[in-house]
Image (tube, coloured by chain):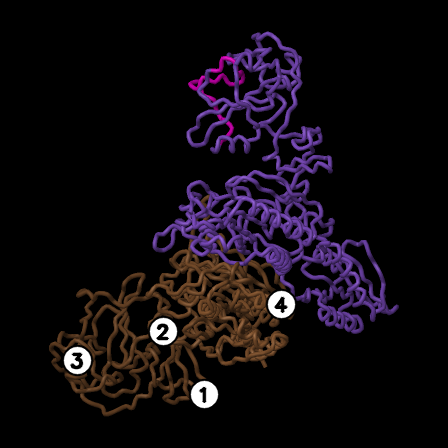
Chain colours: A brown, B purple
Amino acid sequence: MKVSSLLGERLKTVSDDIAIESQSLMLRGGYIKNVGNGIYSFYPLAQRISRKIQNIIRQEMDAIDGQEVLFPVVMPASLWQESGRYYSIGAEMARFKDRSGADLVLGMTHEEASVHLAKNTAKSYTQYPFMIYQIQTKFRDEARARGGLIRVREFTMKDGYSFHTSQEDLEKYYYRCFDAYDRIFKRVGLKNFVAVKSDSGMMGGSVSHEFMLLTPIGEDTLAICSDEKCGYRANMEAAQTVVNNIGGEVEELKEVSTPSVKTIDDLCAFLKTDAKKLCKAVVYQINEDDSYVVVFVRGDLEVNETKLRNYLKKEIHKAQEITVESGIVAGFIGPKDFKGKAKVLYDSSLIGINSLISGANKNDTHVTGLNIERDIGKVEYVDLSKIYEGAICPKCGKPTITLSNGIEIGNIFQLGTKYSKSMNMTYVDENNTPQYPIMGCYGIGVGRLIASICEESHDKFGPIWPISVAPFDVEICNLRADDDEVNKVCEELYETLPRMGYDVLYDDRNIRPGSMFADADLFGCPIRVIVSPKNLANGVVEIVTRDKSFRIEKPVSEAAEQVMFLAIKLEQEYKIK
Amino acid sequence: MKVSSLLGERLKTVSDDIAIESQSLMLRGGYIKNVGNGIYSFYPLAQRISRKIQNIIRQEMDAIDGQEVLFPVVMPASLWQESGRYYSIGAEMARFKDRSGADLVLGMTHEEASVHLAKNTAKSYTQYPFMIYQIQTKFRDEARARGGLIRVREFTMKDGYSFHTSQEDLEKYYYRCFDAYDRIFKRVGLKNFVAVKSDSGMMGGSVSHEFMLLTPIGEDTLAICSDEKCGYRANMEAAQTVVNNIGGEVEELKEVSTPSVKTIDDLCAFLKTDAKKLCKAVVYQINEDDSYVVVFVRGDLEVNETKLRNYLKKEIHKAQEITVESGIVAGFIGPKDFKGKAKVLYDSSLIGINSLISGANKNDTHVTGLNIERDIGKVEYVDLSKIYEGAICPKCGKPTITLSNGIEIGNIFQLGTKYSKSMNMTYVDENNTPQYPIMGCYGIGVGRLIASICEESHDKFGPIWPISVAPFDVEICNLRADDDEVNKVCEELYETLPRMGYDVLYDDRNIRPGSMFADADLFGCPIRVIVSPKNLANGVVEIVTRDKSFRIEKPVSEAAEQVMFLAIKLEQEYKIK
């Protein structure tokens, strides 16, 4: 491909609003163009990267016996009514009516479609296990599209679905797929990624993992044990908060007047105590009926809303207003003598503290010396708090938890029988008894992966694409397009290198070297061959890597071979041992 | 791939309603599964074919300097409002609102998106010409989905858009793409296809061609000159009807009473004349205001509604009811003394007939001896009639027109500046003057192509896939899965053949030969290797082609080589010379 013909414009600047570097560079380099909120077209550069990534994904899915299929983007609502998700998913799912008035939806994931395809086909246990996958467009009406390809509404996704006759078989396959994902992310050139246990959310099922690229721009927070031998990693949403309270002295329960004390900090200052001795109340409301939920949690910790949501199995929100009728005395809520109309929950961070300070359920009043067992009785403790920097690792028990931001680049779920049961998919086992297959599902978003690679591998001038996914392996820079000798050498290389199996971009434009190099940095091709009259006077061309770590002059006759050596070296970096 | 693991069920029968053989065979063979009206999922077999076709398309598009891009499936309505098609396209386009209330549409074609992507990027004439294409899902809310993948609502399509600075340059590229299409259809194994001139319909533009597979199940009718030297071919919708009337005697205009004459046949019988002497009236209504249009046409011909629609540039329908107020005397309409409230059109089939019979615009009355020039005056004649079997070829002038049915498998359009003008895309020419680029567009539906190949190449037992697109090149049939020697030979071939570059399907199931061969016919793999204890007793395996034209026994040690010879021979059939 010649740069003079390549569609896509390189820009000097983009809007100041764009804070994410991959987004800025991919807009500046002519990779993507915004069509609407969270909707992009791909210029040839991005589409080339996308196809290389898709091929790597396809190879790895085929290697674990995946069978490529195709599900529709547009599906009848009836399919989603069968599983019940037509009702449980909200505005994220796009819905419309066709010309006959029938309800249709746009696929945001394809569990239902996979069961529909496999149902009535895999009828005997002898046909199990199997995995089917597709690479297809999805649409999710995200409330907050952001960051270029990081969080969009329309995206290309690889989604796979496996079907099993036992939990053991699912687990065996699940970890095979785990390993395939690990290989995929290594092969596309990512370095700083981890797999973490995650919350399964709307997918249903129990065990699930997210593959996360560690990066400050990530929207997710990960809890990682800094002891590498331990290796504990989880999404903050799913990480168990372990608290080892030292009991402390038992004290008498006493009321104290606390006028004009509004916050936890106020209270600590007023009573000269530490937030760890406080029993804080956080009030939520259940969406469907606005009824109240009061969570008691140690004063220095936060409630993890995902844990609360999963425990209640209901959607919730922070209480906006606490009515007088509720009997809840806002600001002074405590376990003792609580008479509000609310569900009361105790976070496990309160276990084992002998003497707590809490609200007294009266205005301007707190109690000290609260001992839950003595003063309240036996309560159920639930893990509802957010893990924090320096927390105790739930695996190794040391206070070694660190928090990092991450972008989710892939996820795998053990779905169980949620979909096979609700959609009544069965097979007969060895004893001719009907059984529901146990499912797993496995997703990777291609566009987000492109942005993540760019986010991890760039400098201020442009992306530094790993050779496994680069739109072109090599760029030839012709520094004097009006010089016959320079043209001749460039054109020979432009003929030779593709014959050796390399994708070559040729900048044949008659522009100044500064502009050409700026564009070349935005193209991010791993290897660059620079042909100039000055070098040719010495019989050489210059070969450099995009990351600028390597630079060599070579006789024209050895240029192609040098490119090959460099390419092999770069390819080795992403080879799986 | 082993058949025991392959997802997809083979069926003995399908519903009697299915009259199209490709649809029946692809359902019976486990290629596709209906998800909703005009919406299918692809089992692995169909997806494998789809990917092979996509690769062929991609190679040919790249060979004519196409650049692969990706446009969104979901687009903001504003993009289609810019071109005006948001308003001019009806229920075919799916529309919905997102969570913020913004109007979105599903892409049924991507002219607007292509202009959006190229606009502000290709700003100088030096960047022209270029062609961008994508392979992507489309949704068209067809009123009459039918025939399996022949006419669906959701489909995968290759659509390309080229941009030029002159009509000459567009035409040069247009015919390059024409040739690429010809190569694509040959390479996927189609034999009986033709390119015909077509009506451009909603795409706008002037010159366009459709590539048509000639088949009795085709929905389109083609007019083809049977003189091969002439080579005239057109879609019936676009074919000019040439009529050479022999003037005949001039007669006096006379009224005749024609009581109880209802039809053209009645009238011919009553007046003992030929339909070619009649001036028939056909009444339409314009959709937007129900106003009438009367078309006068020679009695033996039909009105071509597409020609009428294009002439009026309005949507029309056959008049359902002719009101008394209109002043049109239904059943007795004629040019002479016509006083109805209607637009009147004269088809060119009436040119040069000296004496016509027509209605007299009075009940139960006709006139004879009507001479349009003498009795009506100078009228404009328009080509509005359907071409017919035996009609005069508009190219060579001989009465050699034959009609054939065809399926449209691809189309190419010269769009002109319709989209660049309406969306205000400009570049500057050599003189620094802004100009609108001239566009072409080029489409191939992948799913329909799969069905078309199957339709052309099958027997009553199953598809006979051309080796270039077959889901697998070779199938190994193990006739005794409980025989160690048979298993050993099968498994060696199952290892060897893939290493030689072939896609291999291995039927490893312990089933009866009759069932295995029936399934093998449905899989349609071009080459089959049959391994049985009986053959192995003689040291041989049996190698046959799916079309059953070739059968040979070969020693086990020569089997792989024989497969290679056969594959090369089959590949030659689809090579472009």
Residue A548, compared with residue A156, is above or below; it is below
Question: Could you say which is closer to the camera, residue B252 or residue A536?
Answer: A536
Amino acid type of the residue that numbered disc 3 sits on in the rendered structure: Asp
- In the picture provided, is A92 more to the left or to the right than B411? left
**CA gap, disc 1 and disc 2:** 26 Å
| Mark earlier in primary sequence (1, 2) | 1
Q: Chain of mark 2?
A: A
**Quadrant placement of the C terminus of chain B:** bottom right
Picture residue at 33% right of the left edge, 74% below the top: A304
Q: Position of residue B320 (x, y in %)?
A: 49, 26
How crowded is the residue under tag 4: few (<14 C-alpha within 10 Å), some, or many (20+)? few
Mark 3 or mark 1, which is nearer to you? Answer: 1
The image quadrant that residue B272 belongs to is top right
Mark 3 or mark 2, which is nearer to you? Answer: 3
On the same chain: label 4 and label 3?
A: yes
- In the picture provided, is A457 more to the left or to the right than B299? left
Name the residue that disc number 1 marks: A228
Name the residue that disc number 3 marks: A266
**Quadrant placement of the N terminus of chain B:** bottom right
